[in-house]
Amino acid sequence: AAAFLDGEIRMVPADTGAKDYEFPEAPMECIYTIHSEPATLPRSYADRGIRNVEWRLGLPPLDVTRLRSFSAAGLTSTDPIRVGEADVVPRDVLVAVLMRQGGAIPDPGMVEYLRVIVSGARDGEPRTLVAEMKVVVQPEWGDAGLSFVTGVPPSVAAQMLCRGERLGDGVAGPETMLPVAPFFAELARRRLPATLDGAPIA
């Protein structure tokens, strides 16, 4: 997994960097996984003296246990092994078996959190801001429930473009391309409300 640490991109082992975060429902251990923010945010805010951008993911404990057991058993290895008359790659087998299970249908009422913690200084004083989005899976989302929060924001951006709204020029991360208030207002209309230090963003 990539992390932007001390002013540079570093590759760190996935499932490391564990930190515990408190959420209203329960504490959650979150670990490094691959994601795009450590790549785009340092470029977008290079003029702000940004030094660290880390992405961590938290999953239900049972899911974490299953994933770690796959790795511990060698099922994520890319080194071929001999099985009968054939050489097989354990990870290929694992992926094929998991894909055969079909997509998981999330339980209505399941909660997903996205939290951004920004620490720095303003007017020479230390300052920390916390932005958060709490997503409650709705029954009508069906088997798209787990991908709703991933699919809706780019859909909103595409609709803004189709309406002729001017976004940023060129190619860059969404943090510099999208108008903040209109974008978050559209998300809130789609049951994706976000807050900054507890106040609605919109």
Image (tube, rainbow, N blue to C red):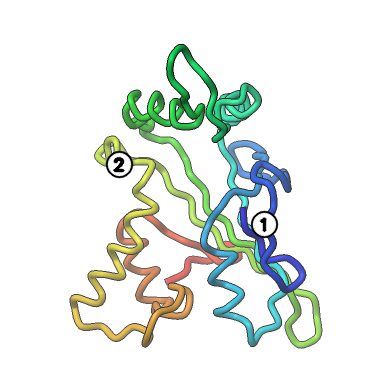
Q: Which mark is residue 11?
A: 1
* Distance from the alpha carbon under mark 2 to that under mark 1: 31 Å
Note whether 30 is above or below 72 in the view shown.
below
Picture coordinates of residue 188 (x, y %)? 36, 61
Give, as a three-letter code, the residue at label 2.
Ala
Give, as a three-letter code, the residue at label 1.
Met
The residue positioned farthest toward the top in the image shown: 84
Please identify, in this view, whether the residue under mark 2 or under mark 1 is nearer the observer. 1
Lateral position of residue 57 relative to residue 18, left or right: left
Say whether residue 92 is visible: yes
Given residues 177 and 122, the one toward you in this image is: 177
Lateral position of residue 140 relative to residue 182, left or right: left
Q: Residue drawn at (76%, 79%), measured in percent from left and top?
A: 121
Q: Does label 2 or label 1 sit earlier along the sequence? A: 1
Lateral position of residue 177 relative to residue 34, left or right: left
Q: Residue drawn at (69%, 77%), measured in percent from left and top?
A: 50
Residue 26 placement: quadrant = top right
* SS label for mark 1: strand
Q: Residue drawn at (51%, 27%), measured in percent from left and top?
A: 90
Residue at mark 2: 144
* SS label for mark 2: helix
Say whether residue 128 is visible: no
The residue positioned farthest toward the front in the image shown: 85
Picture coordinates of residue 109 (x, y %)? 40, 35
Picture coordinates of residue 38 (x, y %)? 59, 65
Q: The C terminus is located in which quarter?
A: bottom left
Picture coordinates of residue 141 (x, y %)? 27, 41
Note whether 125 is above or below 64 in the view shown.
below
